Image (cartoon, coloured by chain):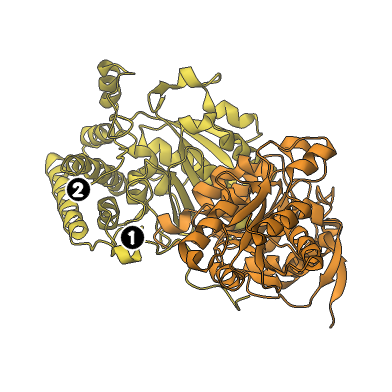
Chain colours: A yellow, B orange
Amino acid sequence: MNQKLRIDRVHLINQLRQMLRIRRFEEKCTQLYAEEKIRGFLHLYIGEEAIAVGVMSVLSPEDQIVATYREHGHALARGLSMGSILAEMFGRTNGCSRGRGGSMHLFDKQMSFYGGNAIVAGGLPLAAGLAMANKKQDRDAVTVCFFGEGAVAEGEFHEAMNLAVLWKLPVLFVCENNGYAMGTALSLSESETNLARKASGYGMASSQVDGMNVVDVESATSSALELIKTTSQPYFMECKTYRFRGHSSFDGQLYREKEEIRQWEEKGPVIRLQNWLKENNHFNEDELDELETEIKAEIEAAIEFAEGGAWEDTGDLCKDVYSPTREGEPG
Amino acid sequence: MNAQTLTYREALRAGIEQALEDDERVFLMGEDVGRYGGCYAVSKGLFDYYGEQRIIDTPLCESGFVGVGIGAAMGGLRPIIEVMTVNFSLLAMDQIVNSAATLRHMSGGQFNIPVVIRMACGAGRQLAAQHSHSWENFYAHIPGLKVLSPGTHTDARHMLGQALRDPDPVIIFEHVMLLNESGEVSEAPEADMESALVRRLGDDVTLITYGGSLHKALDAADKLAEINISAEVVDLRCLRPLDTDTFLSSVAKTHRAIIIDEGWKTCGLAGEISAIIMEQGFWSLDAPVKRVCTAEVPIPYPSHLEQAALPQAEQIVEMAQAIMEGR
């Protein structure tokens, strides 16, 4: 067991709070989507919250995050304000990407949050590059790259894995294996379904983690970071999880049985931690109500913030395609 | 210091050396750029001097190492990424188009990508249909990118430095037929990297071109002078953003334009420039705008067919004569 593992009551309640914030926020998002306040795609993280919360709780502010289009949870757990995330999903200028990215492209430089990349596996080489910059500039930061198991089939996954080991880049690759790449089950897309084993083909240390257990994820992340820092090598962590909702807002879920979803929901990360805390008398209903009330207020404030945001003037349509000025002397 | 004479390859190398000297954040990365000395020997000798931390050999994974370069640029470095040829760059197009070109905008201006990507382009070495193409137009199509085409030795020497000072992603195309040619290199850049330049003054017709076709246009202008047709030659230099003022002013003076472009005619740069002239310079025209482009065929291997496919000075002369005679 890792020495840094924190299983004290206060910390665990905080982890529950973080997971519940994501859960309730996204539940509200489905409603806001139905009301057409959020448009485009909406990829929900519901069911997978333990991964983002577990990983983020171990990171330092200088560590960098590269995420995917299913990144609301990562952004919230990293510390982006709920208001700036929702405003982004509303397309307003007070959004974390000034409204230019939407749900799939949340960015925040202050939080070292390098985005929501919506090209499957597209973020992996970028993460390796950020890690290269850290290494060359003697920065202690680790780059943490989240991606789904669908990315493992892409060439960029293999290219990035190879380069990361070859060049000893401090990257933590976090594979969120929710079993389906959109609607295609892992067994239908991979010849080797033990994904952690793929890492060994590149000489990269790896582990499989129960992605429905926030304590396990935190512990595994803590060990992985230690290994990355002591060995100057990347690490691959496969978190087994399940998304309770469809791939995106347009998913009839014809590819899986309702019973399968129900079974996974029973071992969901929120309910699991909640029950454990109650069974061990760390937590009572009143405290849970308090937590829910607090989160509800945060969501309401976020909606108010987002709705109050200005629309970008169409006169500024082409802003931020290029930088306004050049570095140093021109020409 | 006066101008010196270098080959185009030496001029490119001098540009890289200067960049490495000027800024310790700069490094060169690509396939065989180090120990091998570069596919086209542009970086020959640099590995021995600068070492493996700054001259980085990569595996054959264009998407991977271009993506790493983009990430490294976001992380505060100034990478020069060499992709052997534009043909192979299609394997990295996802990273160039979906990441480098979009990240600044998608992040609401928070992250800029100061990466420079160099790649060889062009036909003439009998390398057939997977090593010979001119796809500057693919990249010039993309908002968020800047695209340079050094057609002179001075530009080969200085454009890299200019590109590295730019905070946004810049792609530089280096035509393979220029590499062995010698020419004068001036001590300083001739102009801002985004400006087109008039390379020869003339009155009767404007030849608009860039990169490997520049010397063909200049040759054609010499031949035209012998038959009393005075051709002005505009070197675009930067294909995105386009310096439209320079070629529109020239056309306003000569009233005729021929665009010479080694890309294919269909959906190419020549069509774009022609459209700009129609939109903004139509009333100054005395003749239809013409294009001399590569034939619509994958570049063939035999020399006579390859040459037949490419724009040639004779074609330019013939076309200029035709429009002067109202044909």
- The 10 Å Cα crowd at callout 1, few under 14, some 14 to 19, many 20 or more, is many
Residue A274 place in picture, x, y as percent: 24, 36
Local secondary structure at mark 2: loop
Residue A226 in the image: above or below residue B223: above
For the C terminus of chain A, the quadrant is bottom right
Left or right of A235 on screen, residue A96: left
Task: Identify residue type, mark 2.
Answer: Lys
What residue is drawn where x is 29% and y is 46%? A18
- State yes or no: discs 1 and 2 in contact (Cβ < 8 Å): no
Residue A254 place in picture, x, y as percent: 30, 19
Q: Chain of mark 2?
A: A
Q: In this orientation, which residue lies closer to the viewer: B259 or A188?
A: B259
Q: Is residue A2 visible?
A: no
Q: Which residue is mark 1?
A: A98
Q: Quadrant of residue B45?
A: bottom right
Residue A162 place in picture, x, y as percent: 65, 38
Q: Quadrant of residue B3?
A: bottom right
Task: Identify residue type, mark 1.
Answer: Arg
Query: In the image, which disc is placed on residue B11?
Result: none
Q: Chain of mark 1?
A: A
Q: Which residue is mark 2?
A: A37
User: How far is the residue under mark 1 from the one under mark 2?
Assistant: 16 Å
Q: How many marks?
A: 2
Left or right of B6 on screen, residue A105: left
